Image (cartoon, helix red, strand yellow):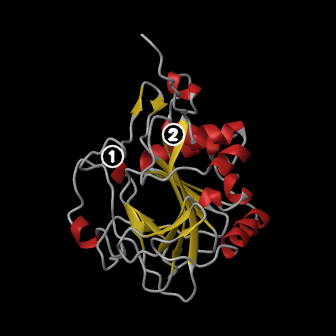
Amino acid sequence: MERPTDLETYLFDLNGFIVLRQALNASEVAALNTCLNAIPAIEQGQWHGYIHGHTYGTHDGLNYQQIYEAGEPFEELIDHPAWIGKIKHFVGGEGTFDYHHGPLFIDENFANFRGPGEAIGLHSGGYPPIMRNQFRYHNGRFMCGQVNMLLALTDIGHGDGGTMLIPGSHKSNFKHPHFDMHRMKPEGVSVEGLEGAVEVELQAGDAILFVDGISHGSARRRNPGIRRVAVYRYGPSWGNFRYGYEPSPALLERLTPERRKIVKPLETIPRSPAAM
């Protein structure tokens, strides 16, 4: 469970993201794609077991929410050693009461399929401040409200609809003057052409770790074929599910104790009525 290097810590603080090249090997990527291929095609609003078809309503592609239900290869992403130590460091909480409970919690996890013509517009940023998206470094510790892991399951080069970010925007005190031209809209506006934004090209198995408070979106998919990524969003253990999903009893039963703490950090306290 590797913590970030000094250079990774510097770049995450400076830019709001780091890229992990070959975080997964070819066999791991193949196993994940095999799991996805085994899921019958579902559309928005449909279910396959505990996996739900979903979109953000912006012509950005289709999401398979709760993708850690898709099989063991996706369960292994919950605390994969390539990033879990870095995620814990950037979210923070080690050595505190929160750490006793994780300190992490995955409030959303999905596979995204993006085809030709699709993109997701710009969202997030340091201004206006949002508590869940906060980036903070205080007294020698990071305390980030949410850190995302985006894993490429296919090669993502020029024209493939890659992730775009504005480096340093997680600490911005001002709104980008052209933000509204590129923000998320039903027609699927892209981030291409926005001054200050960079597109990150990835090979299958590469991952981006970024604080959710950074302004981000994507380029438009122009090439044939489908871009595939998996996204796991980590925050403090006291968070809640973004869309009200819940892990299946079967998933909780088969997870390791360490993974179960991240998927469901807190158990409700049963109470039986008793006389006063």
Q: Is residue 6 visible?
A: no
Q: Which mark is residue 90?
A: 2
Q: Is residue 169 visible?
A: yes
| Residue 256 to residue 26: above or below | above
Return the disc, 2 or 1, that comes first in the chain's sequence: 2
Question: Could you tell me residue 10's position as x and y percent?
Answer: 50, 43
Q: Could you say whether the residue bearing mark 2 is in a helix, strand or loop?
A: helix
Q: CA distance from mark 2 to mark 1?
A: 15 Å
| Residue 110 to residue 134: above or below | below
Q: Could you say whether the residue bearing mark 1 is in a helix, strand or loop?
A: helix
Question: Could you tell me residue 146's position as x and y percent?
Answer: 45, 45
Most extreme residue toward the top, as rendered? Answer: 276
Q: Which mark is residue 73?
A: none
Q: Nearer the viewer, residue 219 or 43?
A: 43
Q: Nearer the viewer, residue 197 or 2?
A: 2
**Residue under the point 37% across and 50% down:** 213
**Residue under the point 31% across and 80% down:** 187
Question: Could you tell me residue 76's position as x and y percent?
Answer: 70, 52
| Residue 209 to residue 96: above or below | below
The image quadrant that residue 243 belongs to is bottom left
Left or right, residue 25 beside residue 156 = right
Q: Nearer the viewer, residue 95 or 266?
A: 266
Q: Which residue is mark 1?
A: 171
The kind of residue on which mark 1 rests is Lys
The kind of residue on which mark 2 rests is Phe
**Residue under the point 53% across and 75% down:** 113
Most extreme residue toward the right, as rendered? Answer: 27
Q: Nearer the viewer, residue 274 or 124?
A: 274
Q: Which quarter of the rendering shows the C terminus?
A: top left
Label 1 Cα neighbours within 10 Å, binned few <14 / some 14-19 / many ≥20: many
Left or right, residue 82 beside residue 171 = right
Question: Could you tell me residue 93's position as x and y percent?
Answer: 51, 29
